[in-house]
Image: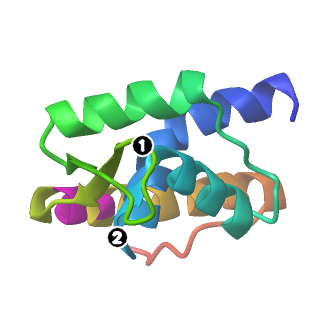
Amino acid sequence: MGHSQRELLKGSTPSLILAVLADAPRHGYGIAREIERRSGAALKLGEGSLYPALYALEREGLVSGNWETPARGGPARKVYTITEDGRAELARRTRDWQSFAASINRVLGGDEPDVQPI
């Protein structure tokens, strides 16, 4: 992944986390692996970007984290769940991203926006 892709990923990390948690609660490692799986291995989050984003989302009330002990034993893991506020934020972020991506695509593709004459 190039430098510019890493910067884009860094800014998108909270949205990606919310999208993954919208489907099911997961622990941090599970969130990272699901983002990697859904992106066809193009997006890989390390602990240095994943956990700070998770903690920020938790502080903002967009996700909640609860410690759970696996049924087969082993150390407790913090499992994150999206909140209702998190779902609303994901919807807003999705709309904003789609609008932004459409604008960039119009510029890159040379397409003119559909503007009605006054």
- Mark 1 is surrounded, within 10 Å at the Cα level, by few (under 14), some (14 to 19) or many (20 or more) other residues, namely many
Dividing the picture into quadrants, the one containing residue 19 is bottom left
Q: Which amino acid type corresponds to the residue marked 2 in the rendered image? A: Ala
* Closest to the observer, 34 or 97: 34
Quarter of the image containing the N terminus? top right
* Closest to the observer, 96 or 56: 56
* Closest to the observer, 79 or 16: 79
* Above or below, comparing residue 56 to residue 39 in the picture: above
Furthest toward the front, the residue is 73
Residue at image position (72%, 30%) is: 6
Determine which of the numbered discs, if any, sits on residue 81 in the image.
Answer: none
Determine which of the numbered discs, if any, sits on residue 22 in the image.
Answer: 2
Q: Which amino acid type corresponds to the residue marked 1 in the rendered image? A: Pro
- Mark 2 is surrounded, within 10 Å at the Cα level, by few (under 14), some (14 to 19) or many (20 or more) other residues, namely some
Decide which of tag 2 and tag 1 comes sooner along the chain.
1
Along the horizontal axis of the image, is 8 left or right of 11? right
Q: Which residue is mark 1?
A: 14
Dot 2: what SS?
loop
**Residue 33 magenta-highlighted:** no
Quarter of the image containing the C terminus? bottom left
Q: Which span of residues is magenta-colored?
A: 86-90
Label 2 to label 1: alpha-carbon separation:
12 Å
Residue 94 visible in the snapshot? no
Dominant SS in magenta: helix
Image location (x, y in percent) of residue 12: 52, 42
* Closest to the observer, 5 or 14: 14
**Dot 2 and dot 1 residues touching (CB under 8 Å):** no
Residue at image position (12%, 57%) is: 85
Residue at image position (29%, 66%) is: 91
